[in-house]
């Protein structure tokens, strides 16, 4: 049902995968002298992208992430995110929202002669596009 809704709503590129998560808190509380790697836990991740691969929703058990490389105002970005969040709430009945975060990058405008390639990590210019290029 969720996949079908995203497909009809302009996000037909669906991928299912695993992300590895870890928790540092037990290691920090333990305070052992020897370095230990934190245990990793696999988490199912569902990815819904638009056809131009400029907007992508990542859905995990405890999070919804919107990655976008092309939008002109925050209102456009927020409308996309809130519309999908409302759909998920109507579908599964979200109990609460633990955290909302927004990260912005003021990108340089290459069309005006300001090339951002030398000063920015390639992912900063659009994680979705970079991932597509490296495939």
Image (cartoon, grey):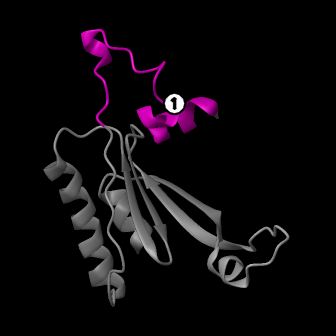
Q: Residue 64 occupies which quadrant of the picture?
A: bottom left
> Is 24 situated left or right of 35 in this image?
left
The residue at the point 64 percent across, 73 percent down is 24
Seen from the viewer's position, the closer of residues 102 and 19 is 102
Q: Kindly state the secondary structure of the residue where label 1 is placed.
A: helix
Nearest to the observer: residue 19 or residue 116? 116
Queried whether the magenta region covers residue 107, the answer comes back as yes
User: Image quadrant for the C terminus?
Assistant: top right
- Residue 98: x, y in percent? 36, 80
> Residue lying furthest front in this view?
33
Residue located 42% across and 52% down the image: 12
Q: Residue at x 30, y 9 (%)?
A: 113
Badge count: 1
Rendering coords of residue 110 (x, y %): 32, 16
Whole-percent x, y for residue 11 in the image: 37, 53
Q: Which residue is mark 1?
A: 122
Task: Write the start and end of the magenta stretch as one range.
Answer: 106-134
**115, above or below 106, in the image:** above
Task: Please rate how many residues cluster around mark 1, counting C-alpha atoms within 10 Å: few if below 14, some from 14 to 19, many from 20.
Answer: some
Quarter that holds the N terminus = bottom left
């Amino acid at each position: 049902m969720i996949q079908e809704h995203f497909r009809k709503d302009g996000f037909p590129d669906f991928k299912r995968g695993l992300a590895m998560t870890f928790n540092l808190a037990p290691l920090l509380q333990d305070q052992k002298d020897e370095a230990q790697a934190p245990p990793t836990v696999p988490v199912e991740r569902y990815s819904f992208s638009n056809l131009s691969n400029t907007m992508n929703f990542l859905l995990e058990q405890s999070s919804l992430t919107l990655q976008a490389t092309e939008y002109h105002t925050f209102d456009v970005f927020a409308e996309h995110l809130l519309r999908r969040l409302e759909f998920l709430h109507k579908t599964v009945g979200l109990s609460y929202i633990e955290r909302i975060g927004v990260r912005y990058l003021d990108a340089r405008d290459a069309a005006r002669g300001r090339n951002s390639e030398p000063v920015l990590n390639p992912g900063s210019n659009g994680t979705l596009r970079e991932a597509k290029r490296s495939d």
